[in-house]
Image: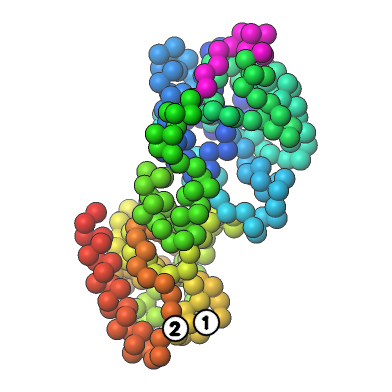
Amino acid sequence: MRIYHSPTEFKKLENATVTIGSYDGVHLAHQKILSRVHELSFKSKSESVVITFWPHPRIVLDRPPESIMLLTSLEEKIELISRLEIDHLLIIPFTRDFSEMSSDDFIKHILVDTIGTKKLVIGYDHRFGKDRKGSFDDLKKYSLMYDFEIEEIQKQMLDDVAISSTQIRQALLKGDVRKATEFLGRHYNLSGIVVKGLQKGRTIGFPTANIEVYSKEKLIPSDGVYAVKVRYQNSSLNGMMNIGYRPTLDGKAHTIEVHIFDFHKDIYGEKLEVLLVDFLRNEKKFNSVDELKNQLERDKACAHSILSQL
């Protein structure tokens, strides 16, 4: 898949099958649309193109960055789209100036003049252009003017999976990672660098890797303890993760800490990817460190049981 970070980098194609969207999460409903784009491009011997935007439009237009909760970083979105046999990914820098582009200008200057669109695939009720005024009817009108076909993925087709990015966010904020997994078609992940913490876990037999997540806009799931898979270099490891304030130990800073089973390497400064498999329990304050240790042993046994079934 070829990746472009500006329309000026894109060389116009003779025959392009195109779709447009933010595609945060690249969840199962998104995958249906992208698979349809690939299918149509294969049948018509055209090249498939996904147009997306970064930063996410909501970051630029709606809210301050610290309040945005995205399911995928840009790098994760690129990786997930690349798995779906798309030929070209155009990432348009979303700025306030770009947000002022009318739907008419977007069709002419981006879809037609820049891309060379011959077939456009969109989800039902898709809106685009300034103030999201562009509609399917506008696209139909301009498709005749500029000689491209348009296909709208019908509501009932996407209703088969009944998924939205909002539903996935809501599930994760409740700690319902099983539902998030079902909707995403994969385990939700957090990726980051291992940084030094207070190192109290190792004093009670549960050393942890503190994760500093790469993307500031990435959604952090509900506080609590999770069974997780950990990707480190070329290995897939089992573990459990705590998100929260560690109230029994200090209760001051919000952290993401992973205890990797049967793992003893020093990995400060290295990258970890954590896949959330199941929610084990809420975070709580114990009456003593011994009581905490006993609970962690039970958590570990529970996580082992869950992860052994994967």
User: Which residues make up the magenta segment?
Assistant: 141-153
Image position, residue 12 (x, y; %): 61, 18
Residue shown at the point (73%, 35%) measured from the top left: 131
Image position, residue 108 (x, y; %): 70, 18
Determine contact: label 1, label 2, CB under 8 Å. yes
Give the labeled residue for mark 2: 285
Residue shown at the point (62%, 15%) measured from the top left: 140
Residue shown at the point (26%, 60%) measured from the top left: 307
Q: Judge whether 272 appears above or below 159 on screen.
A: below
Name the quadrant of the C terminus.
bottom left
Q: From where the camera sits, is residue 79 visible?
A: no
Q: Residue 146 colored magenta?
A: yes
Q: Judge whether 90 appears above or below 260 on screen.
A: above
Q: Tag 2: residue type?
A: Lys
Q: Judge whether 87 appears above or below 185 on screen.
A: above
Residue shown at the point (50%, 39%) measured from the top left: 78
As drawn, the label of residue 251 is 1
